[in-house]
Amino acid sequence: MTQSFFDEGALVAVLTTQPLDRALDYKAPEGGCHLGAFVEVPLGPRKVIGVVWGPGKGDYDYAKIRSVIRVLDAAPMRQEMRDFLTKAAAYTLTPMPAMLRLATRAPGLGDPPSMRKIYRRGTSDPDRMTDARRRVLEFLSDYGDLSFTLKELAELSGVTSSVIKGLVAQEAVAEEDSPRDLPFPHMDPERPSKDLTPDQATAASQISAAVKAGDYGTTLLRGVTGSGKTEVYLEAVAAALRAGRQALVLLPEIALTAEFLKRVEERFGARPAEWHSGATMTERRRIWRMVGQGQAQLVIGARSALFLPYQNLGLIVVDEEHDTSYKQEDGVLYNARDMAVLRASLVGAQVILASATPSLESWANAQSGKYSRVDLEARFGPAVMPIMQTIDMRSEKLPSDRWVSDALKRAVDVRLAAGEQAMLFLNRRGYAPITLCRACGHQVGCDQCDARMVEHRFLKRLMCHQCGETKPMPEKCPSCDAEGRMAPAGPGVERLGEEAVKLFPEARVAVLSSDMYGSARALKAEIEGIAAGGADVIIGTQLVAKGHNFPNLTIVGVIDADLGLQGSDLRAAERTFQLMRQVAGRAGRAEKPGTAMLQTYQPEHPVIRAILAGDEEGFWRAEAAEREQAGVPPYGRMAGIILSGPDVAQVFDAANMLARNNRALAQVGAQVFGPAPAPIARIRGRHRVRLLVKAGKGVALQGAIAQWIGQLRLKGDLRLAVDIDPQSFY
């Protein structure tokens, strides 16, 4: 039987978040400690946080072993959480300390409960308004009834603390004493829900019954855009709450949360906990603690919310499950969709994978019977699916500085004249993807990466989308010194916005791109304003394809439908199909029917034809057959190995050594391709070389890869990353 308590002086193995290859032995502190306890331990001259992972090994001189400094005032990590981290680490080939870091992302875990001063909007207005005061009051109004510490409010409003103290004196801001960590308000699953269609009611009862049973299972909830998938899975959330279990809803974009939170509040009478990069440090600590105590029934979050210490998790919903942002591409390389299924399987929870355009992986799992599948075929209420059309750009005679075809312009004019909204979609941020010299042809690249710099006229700078490096637009060519010859080539959304202003001079044009807003809050506010009729023409990147509801939007024009079809990515067809269907789905979501027009130079391409025909099952079957024949995911296994370092010769030498000594892989029938320079061969000054491992579906690949890369001794600044089930190949 596993030992659950260690008496004072007993040896315990403590796993820390420090980059070490094992747990370290310590003596249990005065009063002893539980298995899973969060502790503070000495490590060299520092004090670090760790978790009691089990009994110590005792392979070290007992007299030299140091003691645990203290046990933190936090609920011990549950066995299922330790199992989840261990299994996730084994699957992704991630060191355990890095996995533990994901599970301890809350500040002040060891701080004792205490009171603090908090600030919220007061009952009066100040006698004299200044810019600084206005910023504070507008910020507090934006956040409704949320409260902030003095430091947070000053930083987020961009003012000094004395400005806030002055507003307190005038009762325009209220100062209150509050416990640091309060439970979240109770959510009532018995509140009346919206009237469901027969389709929705059938789907909701089927999924809710599975939640009520209390066993593990995964359901693919496929519904056309606007079919009411959210209402269906909120009924499953209600079933989990009735059973006294916690629920987690994962969303791919923080910008999606505003509208969604309103719907949750209407359904359950209270706001849930929100876990994402926009949450304040105070709020993160509160959520982490309340989730662990069962005092947060529902969490709405980004992918990292999977690693919160749930006390009794009964349901995980992965909304827009096909979305690529669920794959973390730096640090720990994991796919939140797959990890959600793993976590649920360990606690007997249900998973709902919701999407209008599922990933081929989920579609194949449903086909094989591994997942259940529920379909919603019709839009909710009077809304109908948009009419899909292509515009053959080969027959359009456009000048070189225009990208909106005459056919699309005429169609948009008709909708604007009727008082409706239009959207022009282009999946390129910035003003222009390339800046070149008209004298010598030089293209401005990043100094740190092998990538072209993108002009962002809004920021008045060039930006590298790989490393974030920026520099001013050069007056003269860096290559030939010619002055006044630098010119933008190709369109980004900012340039498309300029064109829209000229083409539709009477219309209000709004450009929606994540890098044009200083905060997620500002982006949310802009989206809400547009949905309420604050713009006539919306220009957007893929940000606008996800979940937003613009009731008056009746036409969507896709400027470059062929963009995603280029390149060697095995998922190019799937992603283009998903993105085009999602973007088109923004049109006609209310009473007025919608139209989606795709500008393409390849109208006969199978993906474009499948989008037009609306034959989703036909597309998946054809795509599945191709992948199965090629033996690639989901009908085969893949892993990417990325070696990087400042010295290109050293990186290639290490990669060649691995490629030559591939016996561990050959023994399980896996093949190695490469080494080859990564498509973006240098990022932040580091040269990157890729190896690709391919194996059959049933192969135990992780053990073979671990043995294979174990031969390599990383010297100096050489780094190696393993990407199991890669989603991108850059």
Image (spheres, rainbow, N blue to C red):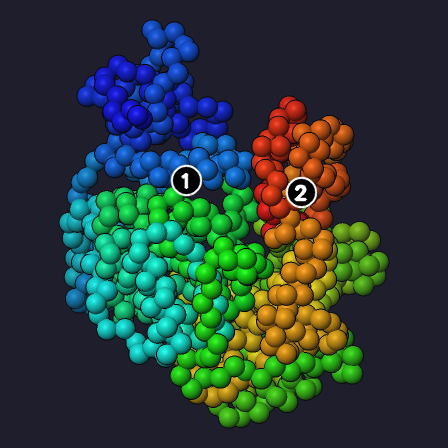
Q: Please indicate, yes or no, whether residue 639 appears anywhere in the rendered image.
A: yes
Q: Label 1 belongs to which residue?
A: 84
Look at 50% across and 35% down and name the residue there. 90
Name the spot of residue 682 as percent of width and height, x first. Answer: 69, 43
SS of the residue at dot 1?
A: helix
- Where residue 93 sits, quadrant-wise, is top right
Name the spot of residue 132 as percent of width and height, x first. Answer: 32, 60
SS of the residue at dot 2?
A: strand
Q: Residues within 10 Å of mark 1 (few under 14, many from 20)?
A: many
| Residue type (three-letter) at the residue carrying disc 1 | Phe
Q: Please indicate, yes or no, whether residue 558 appears anywhere in the rendered image.
A: no
| Residue type (three-letter) at the residue carrying disc 2 | Ala
How far is mark 1 from mark 2, CA to CA? 25 Å
- Where residue 109 sits, quadrant-wise, is top left
User: Between residues 400 and 706, which one lies in front from this camera angle?
Assistant: 706
Name the spot of residue 585 as percent of width and height, x first. Answer: 52, 75
Q: Label 2 belongs to which residue?
A: 695
Look at 42% across and 86% down and name the residue there. 382
The residue lying furthest to the front in this view is 369
